[in-house]
Image: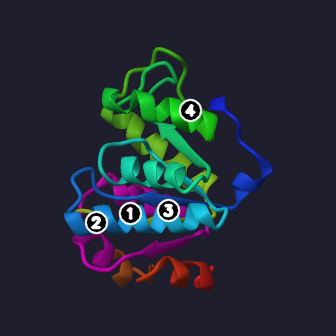
Amino acid sequence: MYIYGKILKKDKNAIAVVGSRLPSARGKRLAYDFAYYLAGKGITIVSGLARGIDTIAHKAALAAGGRTIAVLGSGLDIIYPPENRNLAEAISKNGALVSGFVKGTRPYAKNFLARNKIIAKLSRAVLVIEGARRSGTLSTASHAANEGKEVFVIPGSEATDWLIEQGANSVKSPEELINQL
């Protein structure tokens, strides 16, 4: 594991916030509101630095003055997507960038499935904001469930509604998520 920044003891109290790279306006708002609230309560936000929900979750955690951990699907020297370079630098000062790949590793599609497993391992629970029925978001939820971790979802998308059918916990507010934990 390669780390840029610091992982602290209190980061054991982490929740992954994941979802679509092309979120709806509702998904954007929910991702921001949940991540901001949770980070404000001292919960570290873990996500994958991808476009969409991941980016919003990291930004919300930082805006709340909280900690966040970004798990990359590339080496630490290759920030993907490139427009998140400044965000990655801010995360390294208020959390950490983590990668299972050596420097120089490009962000190949297969790497993101491995990244999703690390996201689940670093988190106490996973919150899926929204997503398509076939998406990487489901792999993160699957890894978490296989590790015996709680999977929370916000109803209203193909992925989250399917996960509810599979036994995931439906939540409508960050307070409800904290109460269920």
Q: Nearer the viewer, mark 3 or mark 1?
A: 3
- Numbered tag placed on residue 27 in the rendering: 2
For label 3, count other residues whose C-alpha is less than 10 Å away and answer few (under 14), some (14-19) or many (20+): many
**Colour theme:** rainbow
Could you tell me residue 40's position as x and y percent?
Answer: 60, 63
- Numbered tag placed on residue 31 in the rendering: 1
Helix, strand or loop at mark 4: loop
Q: CA distance from mark 4 to mark 3?
A: 27 Å
Residue on which disc 4 sits: 100
Q: Quadrant of residue 7?
A: top right
Q: CA distance from mark 1 to mark 2?
A: 6 Å
Residue shown at 34%/58% (left/top)?
A: 19
* Range of residues picked out in magenta: 133-162
Helix, strand or loop at mark 2: helix
Question: Of the residues shown, which amino acid type is indicated by label 4?
Answer: Gly
Q: CA distance from mark 4 to mark 2?
A: 28 Å
- Numbered tag placed on residue 54 in the rendering: none
Q: CA distance from mark 3 to mark 2?
A: 14 Å
Residue on which disc 3 sits: 36
Q: Nearer the viewer, mark 4 or mark 3?
A: 3
Could you tell me residue 171's position as x and y percent?
Answer: 44, 82
Question: Of the residues shown, which amino acid type is indicated by label 2?
Answer: Gly
Q: Is residue 1 visible?
A: no
For the residues bearing labels 1 and 2, Cβ distance under 8 angstroms: yes
Helix, strand or loop at mark 3: helix
The total number of labels drawn is 4
